[in-house]
Image: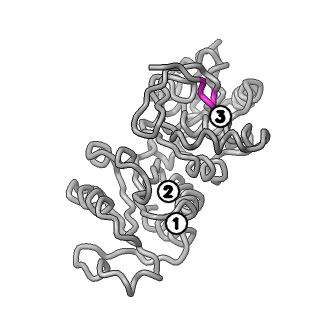
């Protein structure tokens, strides 16, 4: 394997190749893991202005870190990068970024007071989607002053108050894995990412959006990943056999499957007449998100 510098965290790491993707191993974005980036993305990224690239690198590094830390595989194209950068799920305020650090400590703890090592800080400021280590240090001190965390050198602990805050933000439980299966254009992918995923997160789920249109088969969930999920949202607006197969597999595993369909496709689709599939009809993804929140709460 050759060595390359990760665009998003600048670490020089070994890179494997698979089909049209480069696989970065053990960079600061994915410690003890990896992520994939489509090779056609490089030229498009380099053509961006420097301010946009700086914002993009920060958002994507934080996204990769959070997803891989939650056990999710990450395979990205340029279209994915742009939708992630503009997603409402990316934290902007100091408070939102601090909440991500609380969630990280929560995922790595069994109870309040358990110590989690974060060392060196220079390799971990993407935990809070921060552009610099200085901002991470500021967030840490703010959380400490608010008595949400304790710090002993590089050992961090959630206080009882911090644990309660993390539990509340996780809807009272560990974030549950969830798949959202669609077959759509990049714009439709971005729409689902912006309007639906944050609402599922508010219900305590950690959603992974999978697009069965134009993506390689390796990006689709494995049977084991589906079996470990707690919820599957399957949108049946397009004819995507693999989407139906994966959703059907989840249903066979007694996993909660919510079928959905846009109102514009109801008359044209035969699937709504199937006795085993009664999809929720939606007009906008924002409306669908509200309906799912009500159903899942």
- List x then y, in percent, for residue 248: 25, 61
- List x then y, in percent, for residue 73: 43, 39
For the stretch drawn in magenta, the main secondary structure is loop
The reply, left or right, for residue 62 in relation to residue 74 is right
The residue under label 2 is 200
**Residue 69 to residue 40: above or below:** above
The reply to whether the magenta stretch includes residue 48 is no
The residue under label 1 is 289
- List x then y, in percent, for residue 176: 41, 46
**Residue 208 to residue 5: above or below:** below
The reply to whether the magenta stretch includes residue 7 is yes
- Quadrant in the picture for residue 258: bottom left
* Magenta stretch in the rendered image: 5-9
Residue at 63% across, 27% down: 9
The reply, left or right, for residue 19 in relation to residue 130 is left
Dot 1 or dot 2: first in sequence order is: 2
- List x then y, in percent, for residue 263: 46, 81
Q: For marks 1 and 2, give the CA distance.
A: 7 Å
Residue at 70% across, 33% down: 130
- Quadrant in the picture for residue 280: bottom left
The residue under label 3 is 128
Residue at 42% across, 63% down: 183
**Is the C-beta separation of discs 1 and 2 under 8 Å?**
yes
């Amino acid at each position: 394997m050759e060595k390359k510098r990760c665009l998003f965290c600048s670490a020089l790491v070994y890179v494997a190749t698979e089909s049209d993707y480069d696989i970065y191993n053990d960079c600061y974005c994915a410690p003890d893991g990896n992520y994939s980036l489509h090779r056609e993305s490089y030229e498009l990224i380099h053509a961006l202005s420097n301010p946009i690239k700086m914002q993009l690198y920060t958002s994507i590094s934080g996204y990769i870190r959070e997803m891989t830390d939650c056990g999710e595989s990450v395979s990205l194209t340029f279209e994915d990068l742009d939708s992630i950068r503009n997603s409402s799920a990316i934290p902007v305020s100091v408070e939102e970024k601090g909440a991500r650090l609380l969630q990280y400590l929560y995922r790595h703890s069994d109870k309040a007071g358990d110590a989690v090592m974060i060392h060196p800080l220079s390799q971990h400021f993407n935990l809070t989607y921060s552009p610099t280590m200085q901002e991470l240090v500021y967030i840490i001190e703010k959380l400490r002053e608010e008595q949400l965390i304790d710090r002993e050198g590089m050992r961090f602990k959630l206080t009882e108050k911090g644990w309660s805050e993390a539990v509340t933000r996780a809807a009272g439980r560990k974030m549950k894995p969830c798949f959202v299966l669609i077959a759509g254009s990049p714009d439709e992918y971005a729409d689902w990412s912006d309007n639906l995923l944050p609402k599922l997160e508010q219900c305590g789920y950690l959603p992974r959006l999978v697009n069965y249109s134009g993506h390689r088969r390796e990006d689709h969930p494995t049977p084991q990943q589906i079996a470990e999920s707690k919820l599957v949202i399957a949108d049946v607006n397009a004819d995507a056999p693999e989407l139906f197969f994966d959703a059907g597999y989840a249903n066979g595993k007694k996993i909660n499957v919510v079928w959905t369909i846009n109102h514009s496709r109801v008359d044209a689709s035969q699937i709504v007449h199937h006795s085993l599939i009664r999809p929720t009809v939606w007009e906008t993804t924002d409306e669908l998100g509200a309906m799912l929140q009500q159903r899942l709460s």
